[in-house]
Amino acid sequence: HPEERAERAVAAVQFHVHEAERERAEALAELDRAKTDFFSNVSHEFRTPLTLIMGPVERLRDDPPGPDRLAAELDVVHRNALRLGRLVTTLLDFSRLQAGRLRATFEPTDPAAFTTELSSLFRSAMERAGLHYTVDCPPLPGPVHVDRESWEKVVLNLLSNALKFTLDGRVAVALRAD
């Protein structure tokens, strides 16, 4: 019967259209989740240096310092402003990574000195939080080939989380050659 075949054909087409719409909706929902995760991570990355900038700025505003303290506080603000600039660069690099045009850059690095430098960004925030903060990174036997940007992100993220989630006690940073 031609009418039944036509009805079955229409039903089959409607089923495939419905299935395609469902798959498209699922793909859009997954894209939305990925965007939400991305912006959540970006916000977290920006919050750390902003917090580390605001602490010294608030102290300078509330209690005008002498020249030595002013220089130290401005140094913290400057380092974290540079960190924000690097985060903006990282965001721009993200699009290059998606396009397959970005690769890690490994260079000889003294990870002990670099980790100590990065850890120093958190000293005043840790002290304000009432945490005992130690950094123990003795010199290593020689340089190590490291992607400095990735190393920086890892160290700063770990310290940011330690500051956020350590309510009492101590935070220790240590680096050893084994």
Image: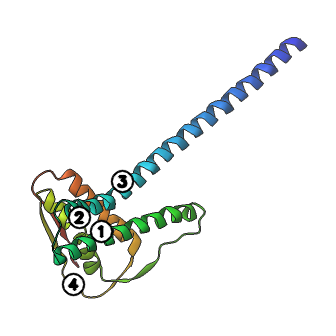
Q: Residue at x 15, y 74 (%)?
A: 66
- Quickly name the residue at label 2: 56
Q: Residues within 10 Å of mark 1 (few under 14, many from 20)?
A: many
Inspect the image, locate mark 2, and give the three-letter code of the amino acid beneath it: Pro
Label 1, on which residue?
77
**Residue ID at (26%, 55%):** 161
| Rendered-image quadrant of the N terminus | top right
Front in this rendered view, residue 167 or 55:
55
User: From this viewpoint, is residue 69 visible?
Assistant: yes
CB within 8 Å, label 2 to label 1: yes
Give me the C-alpha separation between circle 2 and circle 4.
29 Å
Residue position marked by numbered label 3 in the rendering: 44
Compared with 105, 90 (above or below) is: above
The answer to which of 133 and 64 lies nearer the viewer is 64
Q: Is residue 13 above or below residue 50?
A: above
Q: In 3D space, how far apart are the residues under numbered discs 4 and 1 (Cα atoms)? A: 27 Å
Single out the mark in the foreground, 2 or 4: 2
- Which residue carries the number 4 mark? 139
